[in-house]
Image (tube, grey):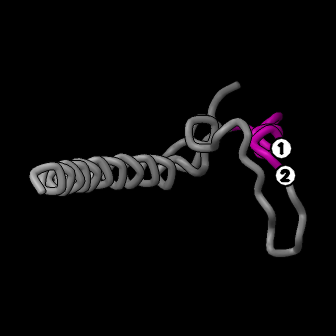
Amino acid sequence: MKIMFRLLGLVAALALLAGSAYANDAEDLGNMLDDFLADTHTETGHAAFWADDMVYTSSAGFRFGKSDIMASFKDVEEPTLDGEEAAA
């Protein structure tokens, strides 16, 4: 019977620890999303957000990865906050 109570206590402790880890993950993911949404117009924002092995499937069924997204920034100047183009 003592073993049963010890196992139950261990399971309860692990559940509590897992809950706090989940809260930290949720906060970290929320911060990452906020940072990305603030920088969606920049190559740097996309480079930091997308995983290297990410595969995106569009609503039309087209699939592409991070390298395709990053290639779309080539030969495009990043806009500045005041709307003027950055000097090359």
Relative to the observer, which residue lies in front, 16 or 38?
Answer: 16
Residue 3 at x, y percent in the picture: 16, 49
Q: Please name the residue shown 60% across and 49% down the image.
A: 41
The image's mark for residue 84 is none
Q: What's drawn in magenta, residue-wise?
A: 64-77
The residue nearer to you, when weighing 35 against 62, is: 62
Quarter occupied by the N terminus: bottom left
- Percent across and percent down for residue 72 are 81, 44
Could you say where residue 76 lies in the image, as x and y percent from the top left? 77, 39
* Residue at the extreme front of the image, as rendered: 1
Asked if residue 67 is among those painted magenta in the image, a careful observer would answer yes
Q: Position of residue 35 (x, y in %)?
A: 43, 47
**Residue on which the image places disc 2:** 64
- Residue 68 shows which numbered tag? 1
**Residue farthest bottom in this picture:** 59
Q: Are marks 2 and 1 in contact (CB under 8 Å)?
A: yes
The amino acid beneath tag 1 is: Asp
- The local secondary structure at tag 2 comes to strand
* Local crowd size for mark 2, using a 10 Å CA cut-off: few (<14), some (14–19), many (≥20): few
Residue 73 placement, left or right of 33: right
Position of residue 36 relative to residue 1, above or below, is above
Look at the numbered disc 1 and give the secondary structure of its residue.
helix
Q: Quadrant of residue 67?
A: top right
Instruction: Please name the residue shown 49% across and 46% down the image.
Output: 81
Disc nearest the viewer among 2 and 1: 2
| Residue 1 seen from this side | yes
Residue at point 81% right, 35% down? 74
Q: Is residue 2 magenta?
A: no
